[in-house]
Amino acid sequence: MTGGQLMAAAERRLGPYWSMTRSQVYRELPVLADMGFVRLGKPGPRSSQPYAITASGKRAFSRWLAEAPGRDALRNPVALRVAFGEQHAGGQLKSLYHDASEYHSEALAMAKEQAKEAKKNGDAYGSAALEFAVAYHKAALSWLKTAPAN
């Protein structure tokens, strides 16, 4: 797959609970190639560069799966702005909460649909990961209803 195809596949499968950027994907692919974890394919249309995982890459992925995951990296831009609530001009927080509520409502609906589809397709693990996204967006919406406004 090309970087764009990998990004699209990752967004579909991981997007509801793991954020990534296109620049991260494109930055890491050459590094993975240098490490022997992926190999370059023949350039395609518009100089697109396909990659394929190698046996070494599959072994590295298996080792990574067996490692301890480490701690969560919590970075919520809305909560960060709320921490500086007293410095906000009138109405800014209400607008921030409104926009965040719209986002979380849409993301919740999408995650619920994806979890339902995963469950229907017999993907218990994918469904379980998506249920995390469902619970996260529900918690965010609940918090937004109680966060103080100026």
Image: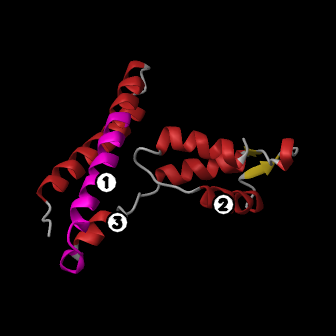
Cα separation, mark 1 vs mark 3, equals 12 Å
Q: Amino acid at mark 2?
A: Glu
Residue 69 occupies which quadrant of the picture?
Answer: bottom left
Location of residue 144 in the rendering, given as x and y in whole percent from the top left corner: 19, 55
Closer to the eye: label 1 or 3: 1
Counting other residues with Cα less than 10 Å from the Cα at mark 3, is it few (<14), some (14-19), or many (20 or more)? Answer: few
Indicate which disc residue 132 carries: none
Q: Earlier in the sequence, mark 3 or mark 2?
A: 2
Residue 95 falls left or right of residue 29? left
Instruction: Name the residue located 40 percent from the left edge and 34 percent from the top edge.
Output: 125
Q: Position of residue 5 (x, y in %)?
A: 67, 41
Residue topped by disc 1: 99
CB under 8 Å between callouts 2 and 1? no
Tell me if I can see residue 86 in this picture.
yes
53 is higher (above) or lower (below) than 115: below
**Res 44 visible:** no
| Dot 2 or dot 1, earlier in sequence | 2
Q: Which residues are magenta?
A: 85-110
Q: Is residue 119 left or right of residue 88?
A: right
Q: Residue at x 33, y 34 (%)?
A: 109
Give the residue type that dot 3 points to.
Answer: Pro
Task: Check residue 28 in the rendering and tell me which mark sits there, or answer none.
Answer: 2
For mark 1, give the secondary structure: helix
Tell me which label, 1 or 3, sits earlier in the chain: 3
Give the labeled residue for mark 3.
77
Whether tag 3 and tag 2 are in contact, CB under 8 A, the answer is no
The quadrant of the rendering that contains the C terminus is: bottom left
